[in-house]
Image (spheres, coloured by chain):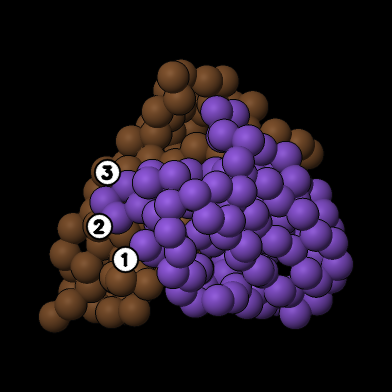
Amino acid sequence: EVQLVESGGRMEQPGRSLRLSCVGSGYSFDDFAMHWVRQFPGKGLEWVAGISWNSDKREYAESVKGRFTISRDNDKNSMSLQMDRLRPEDSALYYCVKDGPGGWFGGYFDRWGQGTLVTVSS
Amino acid sequence: EVVLTQSPGTLSLSLGERATLSCRASQNVDTGYLAWYQKKPGQAPRLLIYGTSYRASAIPDRFSGSGSGTEFTLTISRLEPEDFAVYYCQQYGRSLWTFGQGTKVEI
């Protein structure tokens, strides 16, 4: 069974940093791209960042480009999101998501973790 | 960036009825890169449809997807109690992934 488990979410002040982590199991982790997707309180979904299976390609939403960094360690079946210069509008539930098969990115998200909550507030 | 607009915002239907959800894109979307998800409160989103019309693993056949270009549709042929949820369409293109704002299917 595929499992994705996030950790690292907490309350942090604006301008500070936070690092989210995700560990995957139940599948061949290094065969698939991975992503972070967030859900704002009471609102919709927003893709945040994606990383290819071998880390050669990293893509970011405009809203986080230059502030967030996605990385992965295939030896540890893990992925991380380094979040710098946090803003209140980054407050959301952050999901670790597995990409579907195909090329650098399959284009869709076929498995989701349960999410980790980030709150940015002074 | 491709903007996805879903309609209606809320769909009020009864058990056994047919639900038709629309997703309109601001630019042409490759049919290989259009997906639909179901989201229930307190749960992670679940992939229903990928590649416009392919059902994901373990998804009942009452769910179907269709469309091309800028117009896509998710159809639930006969609503079951567990189908009342929020549904999102999503596209991938030019290294960006975007979601629609969601359609809530309620009783």
- The CA distance from mark 1 to mark 3 is 14 Å
Please say if A57 is above or below A102: below
Which amino acid does the dot numbered 3 rest on? Ser
Mark 3, Cα crowd under 10 Å, few <14 / some 14-19 / many 20+, is some
* Residue at mark 3: A7
* Residue at mark 1: A92
Q: Which mark is residue A117?
A: 2
Mark 1, Cα crowd under 10 Å, few <14 / some 14-19 / many 20+, is many
Q: Residue at x 74, y 63 (%)?
A: B72
Between disc 2 and disc 1, whose residue precedes?
Answer: 1
- Asked if disc 2 and disc 1 are in contact, CB closer than 8 Å, the reply is yes
- The CA distance from mark 3 to mark 2 is 9 Å
Between disc 3 and disc 2, whose residue precedes?
Answer: 3
Most foreground residue, B63 or B58? B63
Most foreground residue, B70 or A112? B70
Q: Residue B22 at x, y = what percent?
A: 65, 68
Evaluate whether label 2 is on the same chain as label 1.
Answer: yes
Image quarter where the C terminus of chain A lies is bottom left
Element type where label 3 sits in the image: strand
Which amino acid does the dot numbered 2 rest on? Leu
